[in-house]
Image (cartoon, coloured by chain):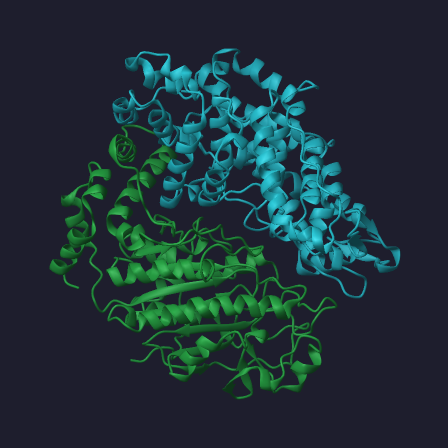
Chain colours: A cyan, B green
Amino acid sequence: MPLSDRDLTRRILQRVGLGPRPGQVDAAGPDATLARLLAPAAGDPGVAATPPPAFAPSAGRAQRQDGAEQGRELAVWWLDRMVAVEAPFPERMAWFWHGHFATSVRKVRSGALMYGQNATQRELGGGDFRALARAMVVDPAMLVWLDGGGNRVGRPNENLAREFMELFTLGVGNYAETDVREAARALTGWRVDAGTGAAALTPRNHDPGPETVLGTTGALDATGLVDLLISRPATPRFLAGRVWARFVGHTPPADADLDALVAAYGPGHDMTAMVRAATGAPAFRDPGSLLVRQPVEWLVGALRALRLPASALPAAALRKGLAGLGQVPFAPPDVGGWPAGAPWLTTAAALSRLQLARAVAGAADLSAVTDVPTAGRVAATAELLGLPAFTPRTTDALTPLAGRPPDLVAAALTSPENTVSA
Amino acid sequence: MNILTRRRFLQASVGAALVAAAGEIGWLELADRTRTHPLPPDAGVLVLVTLYGGNDGLGTVVPAADPAYQDARPDLAYAEHEVLDLGEGLGFNPGLAGLKRQWDAGTLAVVRGVGYPQPDHSHFRSMDIWQTASPEHPTGTGWIGRWLDGAGRDPLSAVSLEPVLPPLLAGATTAGATLPVSGLALPRGPLGTAFAALGAPADGEPELQAVAARAVADLHRTVDTLGPALDGGDEPDARVAGGATAPDAPGGALAAQLGAVARCVEAGAPTRVYSVSLGGFDTHADERSTQQRLLTEVDAAVAGFLERMAGSDRGRRVVVTVYSEFGRRVAANANEGTDHGTAGPVLVAGSGVRGGFVGDQPSLTDLDAGDLKPSTDFRDVYASLLAGVLETDPEPVLGAGRSTLPLLRT
């Protein structure tokens, strides 16, 4: 039996958005909810209320000392932005692309460069993937992260070329080692100016070619290489698999499902269309298509329901909570990004989730719960958090906490029902 | 420790508060676990130390006497008198004084030139290869995870002290437990009781939701078993490939992780494999100072751990293995660093280890596109550890045809 309209609306709000506001699950049906999410209106007050931090553009040595602190500041800002927006799809796609083009401030060490990449992913994330990929291959943070700046004619560095093919476009197995070496030559000559943080091509450091990549020979530059990779059928199928894993479920898609996503993406490389197609797949309406909420999604969902900015949490609790859960924005573990599914469900994470949930519940206005007589508080908590009815297991566990609203909400946030996106 | 004394240990260590916090999981279950999963007193324990980022093997076990090394790295190379002499023209990095003492005591083996055929230069793939022990095909299970699958499927048999489960501990049906180094204090009172109750299974709930519930239940079982050993630990920071250590932890992040392991081992925890790690070894620039600083941290943590372990019967069954996903290119680059390479040394140490060199030192002149040619397959190191430390047949984990190396005293 497919999901009810109400459960489908909740799923859309959690996965295409960043989690429902109180009452939003019942405000509109699934079709209207999806249409509104995918066509975000300009002038979101949540965007205006959360201006990005201003970092000096310099990527020089003195500046780099502050990189770790800037990364923490930027992460809190982004969480605040994700909580504040009324039209969350641009942030959802920026978050998706941050995991895809996973770049860490721990090496980039510049808030300005990390924000620049984030802004590009936000601006282009729902549009033509070719434009986004062209921007990413010469993105200053990316060039620092994957040593593109040290890639010069006669002294090529394969790092960026390899990850671009393996993790960003074609997927592993769809190219040969010789393609990596040739692609690296196409990407020679770029460097990031330490003063301005801008990336520029120094022609004398660029290999004039010709290069042979995937059987095509020509004098390739960065754009030419990206266009070649994008033109391969492997790329949209690889992207569709990534979209599936983040929007639909952890069971790999059938060929027909992939075909539908690729067809929607089409000649315009339209990522919003691909996401819309994912929500139209039969599996998206299957009650069994659960996703494990990534730690940031779990936290942002809670904060959106409680209308609580991340910056209102005790800074140490937030930092330790996300580190303990294994997901700090702008600090992915490596260029492969974060895992999906069951690897998040560790014993250590269960403890960190509880600790962070207590910090959230302790800082939030819980009047939506406290205003209700104790007998109705468990149900009011489910309503507040936008959850379906709890299992008897969870209801029985939470009922003794009705007289202790912060504990009630903290425990509800750690419930198995809230750990997954049903 | 036999069953009786093990039970006594649990009774003595697990305070009333923890028992109350555990809710429904009470003494009967603890007694069951003690009966079903006692760690026999002579059971070997393996501690895997993963160095993320590609530790430069030539800067760790330094061929300082080889002119080809000096020529390849004019600004990076250590002079012969700077390194800690191991013989055969090789010496430890100056930061490894504690491990040099282990070498001198005959309890540290250096396996040279460890790698695999057709080396991959991607951190991601190469670490995946090392952790899954599957160079030919990507696979979803780690080598220790496959051992877990075949060894009773108990998450507490293999424990990570890192925030995210490393792939090496993921089996097809079992995943190792992850423990926070900072201790396992659960809330007491009604919230603690409610949290424990959330770990119970619910009829008909979807699989992943059931897994989430089981993680809560596993946490409570873990606290029951290992909580006392972990109390008083130091605060960890996230492990990242980009190079984080925990600056606020005394002795660094690795020392904090190994301190927790030491407490677990001494307490007789039912764990055969521990996973700890340190990142930051991706030294494309300014390699000499960065690597020596990191190796000094490794040395303080690992040598300190080994010295502590030598002081107890259980500790003397511990074998530590230190590895990275690849070594680095022989020739330095223009930034006084090195790019991704291939083979590197694996260090194996412990009271039961047969010290000395194992395997041949790769040539610095007979190279493969600028990279060292591996002389030892890393799966043979694993086979030796599976057979000698975990006392199991390596074939179900690693496939047929592996040979074992003379790493352990018999």
* Position of the N terminus of chain A by quadrant: top left
| Front one among B92 and A341 | B92
State whether residue A397 is above or below residue A192: above
Q: Is residue A96 visible?
A: yes
B163 to the left or right of A107: left
Seen at 47% across and 15% down, the residue is A5
Query: Residue B59 at what x, y percent from top left?
Result: 58, 74
| Residue B370 placement: quadrant | bottom right
* Position of the C terminus of chain A by quadrant: top left
Query: Residue A266 at what x, y percent from top left?
Result: 70, 31
State whether residue B169 is above or below residue B59: above
Number of labels in the image equals: 0
| Residue A149 placement: quadrant | bottom right
Seen at 17% across and 45% down, the residue is B29
B247 to the left or right of B18: right
**Residue farthest toward the left in the current orientation of the protein:** B4
Seen at 75% across and 62% down, the residue is A156
Query: Residue B60 at what x, y percent from top left?
Result: 54, 74
A166 to the left or right of B49: right
State whether residue B210 is above or below residue B290: above
State whether residue A120 is above or below residue B177: above
**Residue farthest toward the right in the current orientation of the protein:** A204
| Front one among A263 and A66 | A66
Seen at 36% across and 41% down, the residue is A351
| Residue B275 placement: quadrant | bottom left
Q: Is residue B365 visible?
A: no
Query: Residue A250 at what x, y percent from top left?
Result: 47, 37
